[in-house]
């Protein structure tokens, strides 16, 4: 596109206009993530014993939940304690494992906090879309003598199928001022029962 600029240029321009805006924005995102992580952690803490130790399957699930289930802040490096006076083999292993844990655990935490729920919402929306798109064609067309779907739903609700909503819809059916455009000419007159 002519005249467009990379997004990094927009960010640089924004930082020039208001110095420190990116730092403040990232700090706010970190604060939100920290609070969210803390709330998730509070859900897993009852699985641990009073002193915070894991015992049995409940403790294992609590520990896994605290480390991989979203309780670790995703915007900060995970703190891993290194061995004091390690052997050469321990030091070599720690030089590989510790950095992987420091950055990997927050990434896994982000996936369980943000990516999986977003994917679930997207898939649910896709499922609803597929169901709606599956309707149509001659088999789904209104047949003569059938009650229109809008009247059928309103009638079921008015007869109490939807509790308080049924009352409101029943009132609307009686008054007919909200649904004047609906026709139920093939439906018996139940107005005597709705008074």
Image (cartoon, grey):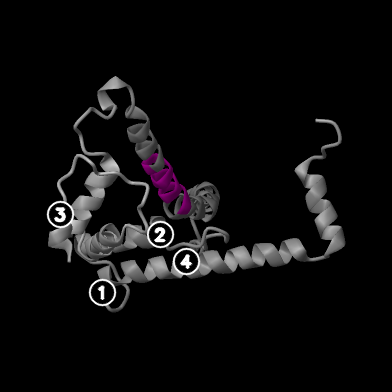
Compute the Cα span from label 4 to label 1.
Answer: 23 Å
Residue behind mark 3:
190
Start and end of the magenta stretch? 114-124
Q: Residue at x 44, y 55 (%)?
A: 113
Q: Are marks 4 and 2 in contact (CB under 8 Å)?
A: no
Residue behind mark 4:
36
Q: Residue 69 location in percent, x, y?
A: 38, 57
Local SS, label 1: loop
Predominant SS along the magenta part: helix
Tell us which disc is closer to us: 3 or 2.
3
Residue behind mark 2:
67
**Labels 1 and 2: the sequence-earlier one:** 1
Residue behind mark 1:
49
Q: Is residue 147 visible?
A: yes
Compute the Cα span from label 4 to label 2.
Answer: 14 Å
Foreground of the two, 181 or 137: 181
Compute the Cα span from label 3 to label 2.
Answer: 61 Å
Q: Quadrant of the C terminus?
A: bottom left
Q: Horizontally, is 183 left or right of 10 in the view?
A: left
């Amino acid at each position: 596109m002519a005249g467009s600029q990379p997004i990094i240029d927009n960010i640089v321009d924004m930082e020039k206009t208001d110095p420190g805006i990116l730092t403040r924005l990232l700090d706010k995102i970190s604060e939100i993530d920290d609070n969210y992580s803390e709330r998730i952690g509070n859900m897993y803490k009852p699985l641990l014993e009073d002193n915070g130790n894991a015992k049995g399957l409940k403790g294992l699930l609590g520990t896994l939940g605290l480390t991989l289930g979203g309780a670790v802040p995703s915007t900060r490096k995970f703190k891993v304690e290194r061995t004091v006076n390690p052997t050469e083999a321990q030091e070599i292993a720690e030089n590989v494992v510790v950095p992987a844990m420091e950055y990997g655990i927050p990434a896994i935490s982000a996936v369980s906090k943000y990516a999986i729920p977003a994917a679930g919402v997207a898939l649910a929306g896709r499922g609803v879309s597929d169901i709606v798109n599956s309707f149509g064609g001659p088999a789904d067309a209104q047949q003569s003598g059938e009650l229109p779907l809008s009247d059928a739903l309103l009638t079921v609700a008015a007869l109490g199928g939807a509790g308080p909503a049924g009352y409101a819809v029943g009132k609307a059916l009686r008054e007919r001022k909200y649904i004047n455009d609906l026709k139920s000419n093939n439906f018996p007159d139940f107005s005597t029962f709705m008074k």
